[in-house]
Amino acid sequence: MRHSSNPMILPLAGTALVGVVIGGLVSYPGWGLGISLLAWSLLQARHYNRLMKWLSRELDELPPEDTGPWGDLLDQLARRHKRGVIREQRLQSAISRFQQCTAALSSAIVIIDRDNHLEWWNRAAGKLLGIDDRDRGKSIFNIVRDPRFIRYYRKGVYQEPLQLISPNNHDMYLQYQVHRFGDDDRVLVARDVTRLFKLEQTRQDFVANASHELRTPLTVISGYLETFLDQELPRPLQRGMSQMQQQAKRMESLVADLLLLSRLEATQHTSDEQPIHIHSLIAQIHRDAADLSADREHSFNLDIDPDYDLIGQELELQSAFSNLVFNAVRYTPEAGNIEISWRVDAKGGHFSVKDNGIGIDPIHIPRLTERFYRVDESRSSASGGTGLGLAIVKHVLMRHGAQLSIESRSGMGSTFSCHFPSDMIRSIKQVANGQH
């Protein structure tokens, strides 16, 4: 039913007209108009009071019966209220189901606001992280105090999860993953990976022990082969002994890489970070790469920022950098060009190795850092690689909070870059003044 724009005008006009008519009958039309308007106002006040009493209640009961415009108003309010109650019930049901769902999860879920304060968490967060009702509104750094977690959280790069000991149970290992949502809010997910950690530890121990046990027989075999090759031997025997010596050296390199990789996997972070004179480190790697190149006539170009050094574990970084440079030498044809650079900008430090060699099909790039993954089995075997070099690079960079990026196309060369966060960079002046 369609109503006029102001449904109160017609009743008001009718009341005024009746008052004027009645007042005119007794020769006092003005008094009749005034009394009728007063009576009409008192009636509207009564309707208004009834409406306010109903609104002041919980709105569980039906609205009072009324007629005219006030009745229409009450009916519309009642319908809107009913729709609101239905929406509220649906929302409450959804919230209840969400809470039941998260309570059933074994992983901890914590919602953190833009100021790093705890807003909400599920039941598992109490068991895994030790959060209780008293922690509402506190900083997440009051709950997880490990400096590695604080560094990971503040960095804002959450592609890789972080694995640490639980702050509530030192026999439990947790894997943390952070996701952004809303207005720079975050949700922290922590799951128990103790069983996986122990299985991985068993695997690492097995590889380390097996590799260690292989070193002694390989050393003996290599020693005897070297002694035999110093003697005058028939040509077929000489050829066989030489091939055996080459394979023994390759096995020794493989065992050395396995031992190094097992040690790197044992912990996620370095414990003895020290200033590194990266210019001397790169110069030494350049000399070793030139020796490896031998008569292949590779051209080496160095572009080194003279004002900044790096902090970290020198032997590990030397292994990572040399793996990248030696790979460039192995897979770049004769007279090829290899560029080694170290630069620093607002985002941090960047060590890069670029070559114009045979390149890599982009389909292989996501798997290059896997253990023993080979783009071309015959090509890798001929180059003398162990298949562990890039896996070692990946783990060294993870322990230094850095990342590896790879750009390559078949036949167009490759660029391998190590990106270090700005807090791992030190200016030469800082190092000279003893500032770490």
Image: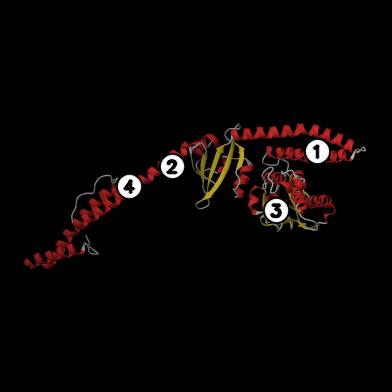
Q: Position of residue 216 (x, y in %)?
A: 80, 32
Cα–Cα span, label 4 and label 1: 78 Å
Lower sequence index among marks 2 and 1: 2
Identify the residue position indicated by label 1 in the image.
248
Q: Nearer the viewer, mark 1 or mark 3?
A: 1
Lower sequence index among marks 4 and 1: 4
Q: Which mark is residue 417?
A: 3
Cα–Cα span, label 1 and label 3: 32 Å
Identify the residue position indicated by label 2 in the image.
98
Q: Which mark is residue 86?
A: 4
Tell me if label 3 and label 2 are in contact, CB under 8 Å: no
Lower sequence index among marks 3 and 2: 2
- Examine the rendered structure and indicate whether residue 377 appears above or below residue 205: below
| Front residue of this view, candidates 333 and 242 | 242
- Examine the rendered structure and indicate whether residue 186 appears above or below residue 211: below
Q: Amino acid at mark 4?
A: Ile
Q: Which mark is residue 69?
A: none
Left or right of 228: which side holds 31? left
Q: Amino acid at mark 2?
A: Phe
Within-10-Å neighbours for mark 2: few <14, some 14–19, many 20+: few
Left or right of 325: which side holds 146? left
Residue lying at 56% horizontally and 43% vertically, measured from the top left? 140
Within-10-Å neighbours for mark 3: few <14, some 14–19, many 20+: many
- Examine the rendered structure and indicate whether residue 303 appears above or below residue 111: below
Q: Position of residue 5 (x, y in %)?
A: 25, 64
Q: Secondary structure at mark 2?
A: helix
Q: Could you tell me if residue 256 is visible in this image? A: yes
- Quadrant assignment for the N terminus: bottom left
Left or right of 358: which side holds 61? left
Image quadrant assignment for residue 268: top right
Q: Secondary structure at mark 1?
A: helix
